[in-house]
């Protein structure tokens, strides 16, 4: 999965002599040099995201992975899956196996409309483009709007999977601080002013308003209103990424950005991945017609259309099954797992570590005491068979080193307890090592570089973070031998 | 589906006054102006391909579509589809609904290996990337290799669906003539020399060696050998697009480019779309490891991974079903349809029209007498409820106006007869109109602009074309009233 995979493939000088039956499977250094000159500029920043590289390791059965963003698909009964698939085969087998229009099948657009309405939104089916997962929406929006060097605004931290997408289009990503109420729209406006003074304007503002990935915070209603006003005043497009909106465990639902006044500047990204199944690879965009039209052309060039079989499965499940009931079952399960994770963090993480308390979604965001580096920690954690996403994966500028993302939806409660315990143990060891090396012991939380720009540490105060008083039983600094 | 969709959506000046319940579904001209400045440079050439625009029209049930590249999925028994899907649900339901690794599931890579071996090729599973249809391979190869302005070599004519993909990466596409033996490698070498003299070298050579889309011709063995030699000598990558290789009706199979000496410079594109089902959206790339690694990162950014459900269906079908038997059934069906189409062309098309006689695949390529324009003809044909792909869709430089692509796999024999009859009638009418307007009547075949560059008309002679002597019963020019 990495470019620097060593191997025995013959280099340029020996290629001619390669026997016919010799496997051509490994890349040598000379191969890398041979191909390096051929790669497009955009590949310079296209590195495998930390999450993707982790996938290989986290798939080892002995690893407790709190890294991925996996819903628990074991919740969906196999008999029900078989039943709906049989209906698809009987009612529309040949269509399920055939090409579909690029924009998507009308039946699945009806299902999408039900989801939109459940969130207090709505859309004309002609304003909807069915996509190969929500990820493709990010790709197509970039494809439609972004020239190399164009500014895209994102949250700090942002969805780690968006990072390689932005990189592939050579966007200049400006990340704006968040706090407990989500994106700081005042900081956004300041930055837009500063950009405007340079004659620059972002191509779009990328935001995840509900249970943000990775921070777990939710954009407040006043800020939602202000954000769409800003978009309208400045005629800026917003990409509203909303995979988790219906996975709310508590608190009142908030309106989507698109449904507010000013919402005509919003491109809405939705997906069946988190409310039903990511294995279907089905998401959607709702966008202003001229933008959607370009995205449609971009999609045809990318993959012609999304799977007819999985589209018809969704349509059948929404018609015959109880999709709202399935969402409710997931909410109950993930809520309990979130609570177990919060309690485990309380038990196993050191004083000075802080974390968010999401009202829904899949993730929470932990920030460790200053001086610790979660990228280093990950290697150690993997050796203990536990995985998380290091915070740097959520930044394009190297920040995030003190933070990590934890997922509470993908594994059971016992694994959450054990996984958090193992990570906590590694954190404690690292702190003790740091004590020995530096003679100091970090007790205060790190500057909130993870949820605000480094120059502005006061923002840490407004974060809804879970702080613990120092543990009196913990040994004082310098007490252990070097 | 087009950007210039007229409508009543309020423009910039009235947006603030839009009532909340008013649908935001139509784009006015002022909207187009509003958004035009936001679009990326690459969108200038991203136009909806002719094929895609046709999809909407050809889906009307009364239209006989000879336009699409549709396999006949009614051939796959619904009970068998239901059976294999039930096995997937029972054996691997939760996995089918879950994310998969970007590179693809190992089970489906086994199926891919079976296909490769059936074509006399093979690959280490680690050299295979599972993709969202073959189209995504074209997209990812461009993403990995092409900077704006980079040269890509393609055949003349080339796959119409590749045109918007090349356009999205702002490639400078150089199309090289074909004849009855496929790509003219001598013409390629001349062009490479000319490009080299300008200090330019193509990022890759895109070729469809078997039953080329749209031309229907097959690259001969000596040319295959020479092509990979050229690639090795000049260290150029080839993208070998091979969706139809196993759909051979007659004649001896030829080795893939990748399996020949020099094949280490070949990126191989395969797909389950034509041998099994396009509705699954599953294809694959086999590529040199450093290139594949970049493509994998590009894929993660584009859509994370391909559908687990459809991957597991393929794996189950290849394990439990008779995939070779299904390919054989398709071959028998399409062979008979091809023969009906050839006979119908003979019966209904005018003297001077020529067409190819493919030994397999889905398409044949018709070139009409000089002076006719198939883009004009299409509008007329659609009014008679019949569709084809106009030749211009297969060129990036406006050529192809005298040609059209016909598909013989997607509809039954009666529809082929009737469809060809209707197109033939439209062609005859157009010839008569031309006679009246110009006082001349085209009897000679057009210069083979469709299969060779316009300045080189002698190439028409080497084409394996079906020529008809002028029909003595046909009225002489000028005989009908103006």
Image (cartoon, coloured by chain):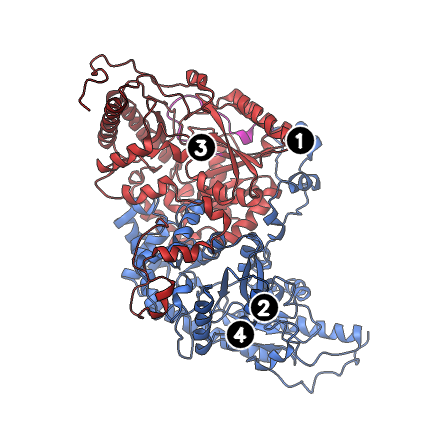
Chain colours: A blue, B red
Cα separation between marks 2 and 3:
48 Å
Q: Are marks 4 and 1 on the same chain?
A: yes
Q: Nearer the viewer, mark 4 or mark 1?
A: 4
Q: Is residue A365 above or below residue B89?
A: below
Find disc 2 in the rendering and name its residue: A194
Residue B1: horizontal and vertical position, in percent? 34, 49
Q: Which mark is residue A15?
A: 1
Residue A467: horizontal and vertical position, in percent? 60, 82
Q: Helix, strand, or loop for circle 1?
A: helix
Q: Are marks 1 and 3 on the same chain?
A: no
Q: Nearer the viewer, mark 1 or mark 2?
A: 2
Find disc 4 in the rendering and name its residue: A184
The answer to whether the residue labelled 4 contacts the one labelled 1, judged by CB atoms less than 8 Å apart, is: no
Q: Which residue reaches farthest bottom?
A: A472
The picture quadrant where one finds residue B13 is bottom left
Looking at the rendering, the stretch of residues picked out in magenta corresponds to: B241-262
Residue A164: horizontal and vertical position, in percent? 56, 56
Badge 2: chain ID: A
Does the magenta run of residues contain A451?
Answer: no
Cα separation between marks 1 and 3:
30 Å
For the residue pair B346 and A224, the one nearer the viewer reads as A224
Q: Nearer the viewer, mark 2 or mark 3?
A: 2
Find disc 3 in the rendering and name its residue: B158
Q: Are marks 1 and 2 on the same chain?
A: yes
For the residue pair B325 and B60, the one nearer the viewer reads as B60
């Amino acid at each position: 999965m990495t470019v620097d995979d060593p191997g025995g493939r013959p280099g340029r000088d020996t290629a001619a002599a390669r026997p016919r039956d010799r496997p051509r499977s490994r890349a040598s250094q000379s191969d890398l040099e041979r191909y390096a000159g051929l790669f497009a500029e955009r590949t310079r920043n296209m590195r495998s995201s930390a999450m993707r590289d982790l996938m290989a390791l986290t798939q080892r059965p002995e690893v407790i992975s709190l890294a991925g963003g996996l819903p628990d698909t074991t919740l969906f009964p196999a008999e029900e899956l078989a039943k709906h698939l049989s209906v698809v085969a009987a009612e529309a087998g040949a269509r399920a196996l055939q090409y579909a229009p690029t924009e998507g099948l009308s039946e699945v657009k009806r299902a999408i409309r039900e989801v939109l309405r459940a969130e207090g939104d709505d859309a004309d089916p002609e304003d909807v483009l069915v996509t190969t997962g929500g990820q493709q929406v990010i790709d197509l929006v970039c494809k439609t709007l972004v020239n190399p060097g164009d500014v895209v605004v994102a949250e700090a931290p942002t969805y780690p999977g968006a990072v390689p997408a932005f990189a592939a289009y050579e966007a200049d990503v400006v990340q704006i601080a968040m706090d407990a109420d989500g994106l700081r729209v005042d900081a956004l406006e300041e930055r837009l002013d500063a950009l405007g003074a340079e004659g620059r304007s972002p191509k779009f503002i990328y935001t995840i308003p509900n249970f943000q990935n990775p921070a777990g915070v939710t954009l407040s209603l006043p800020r939602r209103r202000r954000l769409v006003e800003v978009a309208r005043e400045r005629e800026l497009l917003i990409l509203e990424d909303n995979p988790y909106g219906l996975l709310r465990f508590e608190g009142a639902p908030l309106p989507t950005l698109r449904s507010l006044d000013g919402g005509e500047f919003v491109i809405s990204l939705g997906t069946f991945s988190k409310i039903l199944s990511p294995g279907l690879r089905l998401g959607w965009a709702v966008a202003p017609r001229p933008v959607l039209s370009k995205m449609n052309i971009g999609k045809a060039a990318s993959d012609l259309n999304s799977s007819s079989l999985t589209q018809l499965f969704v349509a059948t499940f929404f018609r015959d099954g109880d999709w709202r009931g399935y969402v409710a079952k997931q909410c109950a399960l993930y809520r309990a797992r979130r609570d177990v994770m919060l309690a485990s963090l309380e038990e196993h993480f050191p004083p000075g570590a802080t974390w968010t308390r999401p009202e829904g979604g899949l993730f929470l965001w932990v920030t460790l005491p200053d001086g610790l580096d979660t990228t280093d920690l990950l290697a150690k954690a993997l050796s203990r068979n536990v995985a998380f996403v290091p915070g740097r994966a959520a930044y394009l500028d190297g920040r995030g080193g003190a933070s990590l993302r934890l997922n509470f939806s993908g594994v059971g409660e016992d694994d959450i307890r054990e996984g958090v315990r193992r990570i906590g143990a590694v954190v404690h060891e690292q702190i003790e090592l740091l004590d020995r090396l530096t003679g100091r012991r970090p007790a205060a939380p790190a500057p909130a570089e993870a949820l605000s720009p480094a120059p502005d540490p006061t923002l840490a105060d407004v974060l809804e973070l879970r702080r613990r008083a120092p543990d009196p039983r913990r040994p004082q600094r310098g007490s252990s031998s070097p």
